[in-house]
Structure formats: structure tokens, C-alpha cells
Amino acid sequence: MCHIPVFCWITATVLEDVLQTREGGQLPKTLTEMYIHFLVVQAKVKRIKYDGGAETDPHWSPESRKMIESLGKLAFDQLQKGNLIFYEPDLTECGIDITAASVYSGVFTQIFKEEKQLYQNKVFCFVHLSVQEFLAALHVHLTFINSGLNLLEEQQTTSMWPKLSDKPKLQSLHQCAVDKALQSPNGHLDLFLRFLLGLKTNQTRLQGLMTQTGSSAQTNREAVQYIKKKLSENLSAEKSINLFHCLNELNDRSLLEEIQQSLRSGRLSTDKLSPAQWSALVFILLSSEKDLDVFNLKKYFGSEEALLRLLPVVKVSKKALLSRCGLSEISCDYLAAALKSNPSHLRELDLSENYKLQDSGVKHLCGFLESPGCGLETLRLRDCGLSKISCDYLAAALKSNPSHLRQLDLSSNNKLQDSGVKHLCGFLESPGCGLETLSPLTAAEQCSHFKPSKKKKNPPLDNSL
């Protein structure tokens, strides 16, 4: 989120206030803390700038509480519908007077803004989706505390508790939210879930806006246990990573510390890791710039299972060393799919000495080489049991997409034969070829088949030819 300008502005706003009002005070440690403090800052701006109040006045007046409740309802209702912009009927439905809409925009300019489309129709939106998600989580949390109503349940029963002992536990809301987020196909509730879990931990920071619900220790323990149970269920990497962010909101780092201690001691044995521990390892590696520069699979007892577990790390690495790890065509299939799923950072890929790869593995890999996001510069497939068919796949894939490839190593693949090198020469003569180093079978075979095109001057090949 540090790459998002609005989030940087929110962070700067919060830090400025913290440094001015809390001499030597503790800085926000979680995303929820940051957004709660941002909301408090905006309430203070409204009180002093527009209401003529003083610094020492309470943050929340009845009017400002009503405003936040209305904006929270709007945020949640529209998040449920997948809407990022809203119209006058949407505001009216949430109890926001249309004539007062400009007051909402003017008072909370950093939270809610009014824009105009063509034909002078008024449209409204929050300055960023994360602000909408935060207010939506706040609305769900407040509604549950005040009435016992779980807005995330499809069939909602009513409201008021006949007596205090009938008060439902916050745990039920949290578990429902976790399940909803995990069921979401596009992850649209991931950030909402982080905010919802973080609100209980930080309830004292919203004094005057929400009712205090006692110690959060028990509720947090129950939420942590439920999330760890879900982490043991072989979730997708993206959903697992978000659950670790949720654990951070709940101030629990036990799983991460366990893996970090094993990494520091050199006693990490990936063949004995549980699914939750694998997820923790992925989360740690994604937070490490060093591992993202050069990812070496052999550091983690290189195997096909280890590669499939650590694919999210490979996706964002610059250099992936996967040689001599017993990989097969299955690895290439999953690897190509992962690398195609987002613009790839990968510049060097070494799959050498994985003799099970075979031609079918190269065919899967070519799906990535053909993709527009591929920026691979070095590809090593030495001693992978390849035949001339692989050269055909590679030549076709590299010709179909203007290639960034500069180095290609196919040496020690004894089945390539002369016809395989001939297929590669078709790529060398293509306009998009920028290859500088080619290492197929033997120097004699390369020299006998490589004939630079007279129409195009290719970059000179190095001594490996």
C-alpha cells in the first residue's frame, strides 16, 4: 500500500498529528491503528475548523457520531454491491440528506468527496477503496455491539437482546467474517476483514464513538485460533497471506516467530512443515528484500513440493535458481501459470539438471515466454532431457512475442540433434531476436547450423558458440 499516493497522504497526516501531540509517543503499528487515528484527526479538524471548538473538546459530538454512522452504512451497503461511486438515491437510503451532502464533503473532505460527471449529475465516492472498507468494517462492528445484529449473515434475525446473558459473542461475527472473506473469489473482503479484526484490539482508541466491550484478550485468542485452523486447510497463497496480516492486527506473531527462529538457527526442515508453517515461510520470504533478489530453492530442501508451496515468492523474485531440484513437467505447468498471473519481475530462471522436465515441461514454460508480461533475460535448461521438439516449442514461443531473452542455455541435452538447432536458427533470424548467448549441443553443431540472416544483423554471439 506504500505505493498508493492516497495511503501515503493518510500516513503523513497521522504521523504529523502523532509527532505534534504525543511527545515520544508510540507510532501506529497496524493498518487499523493508522485508519482509526486518521478518523480521529478528521473529527478534530471538523470540531475546530467548522464548529469553533477547542483542542481539549471531546472528539465525538452527537452530530459527528451520526455522520460516521451514516457514512459507515453507505460504505458497507455499497461494498456489498461492489460499488465505488454512489448517487443521490444511495445517500438518501442511508439517511444522508441530499441538501446536506455538501456539508459531508466539506467537513470530511479527506474521507468523502463529491464530484460531477457529464450532465451535471452529482456522484459521490470515498477518496480510496481502503477508506470505504474501513468505514464498512466500523459500521458492522458498531451494529453488532449495539444490537447484536450480524450484518454478514444472509438471514438476519433481530436485534435487541432480552437480557445481558443473551448477548452474542463477538467471536461469532469474526468467524463469519473470516469465512466470508475466504469464500470471496476476488478477495474483495480481505482488507475489510483486517479492519474488522483490528477494531476490537483498538477499541480504546475510539472512545466516545463505540461502546467498550471489556477485555479483548479472550476474543483475540478465539479469533487467532480460528485463523490458525483455517491456515491448516491448504488455502491459496493469497488468502493465506491475508490471514497472516489478520494475525498481525490481532497482535499474534507466534507462527512467524517459530519459522524465523528455525531460519536463523539453520534447522528449518521443509519436509516436515505443516500447511500453516509453509504459509508463514512464504509470508516471511515475501517480506524480505534479500530473498526476492535471488531465490534459491535448494536453501529449502529443493523439491517439487517446495517449489509449488513457494511459487508466490518466485513470482516476485528477480532471479530464481531451481536447478537440481527433481522438478518435472508438473512444476513447469504451475510455474508458467504463476508467472503469467501478474507482470513478472523475473529476469533469470535456471532449471538446469532437472532431467524429468522433458519436452512437455518446456511446452508449459513456453506459455509464459509467449505472455506480454514476460521480461525474462536469461533461461537455463541445461541437461533437462530435451529433444528437438523443445527447440520447436521455444522457437515458436520466442518468435511470437518480441523477446527480451539475451541468454539461452540448452547444453547437455543430447536428444536435441541437428534438426533441433535448425529450429532455433529460425528464431535467430527473426526481427524480434535479441539473443546474445546461445549454448546448445556442441560448438561444431552450432557453427554448422547458425547462419546469420543477411537482412538483419544480429548481435554477435559470444565464445560459447
Image (cartoon, helix red, strand yellow):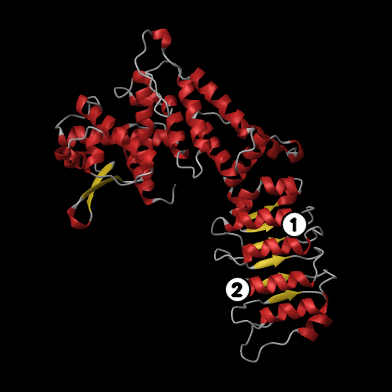
Q: Residue furthest right?
A: 414
Decide which of 338, 24 is in the foreground and name it: 338
Locate the C terminus and report the quarter of the image it occupies: bottom right
In the picture, residue 318 is in which quadrant? bottom right
Task: Work out whether 138 lies above or below 390.
Answer: above
Q: Is residue 284 visible?
A: yes
Judging from the image, what secondary structure is the residue with disc 1 in? helix
Who's the residue at 31% across and 33% down the image? 72
In the picture, residue 202 is in which quadrant? top left
204 sits to left or right of 225: left
430 sits to left or right of 409: left
Decide which of 140, 443 is in the foreground and name it: 140
316 sits to left or right of 14: right
Judging from the image, what secondary structure is the residue with disc 2 in? helix
Residue 394 point in image, percent of width and height? 69, 71
* Amino acid type assigned to the residue bearing label 1 in the image: Glu
Disc number placed over residue 162 in the picture, else none: none
* Amino acid type assigned to the residue bearing label 2 in the image: Ser
Who's the residue at 43% across and 51% down the image? 3
Q: Residue furthest front?
A: 155
User: Gap in Å between the C-alphas at discs 2 and 1?
Assistant: 22 Å
Q: Mark 1: give few (<14), some (14-19) or many (20+) Cα within 10 Å.
A: many
Disc number placed over residue 329 in the picture, else none: 1
Residue 25 point in image, percent of width and height? 39, 31
In the picture, residue 402 is in which quadrant? bottom right
Residue bearing mark 2: 400
Q: Is residue 462 visible?
A: no
Who's the residue at 77% across and 61% down the image? 352
Earlier in the chain: of badge 2 and badge 1, it is: 1
Residue 248 point in image, percent of width and height? 52, 33
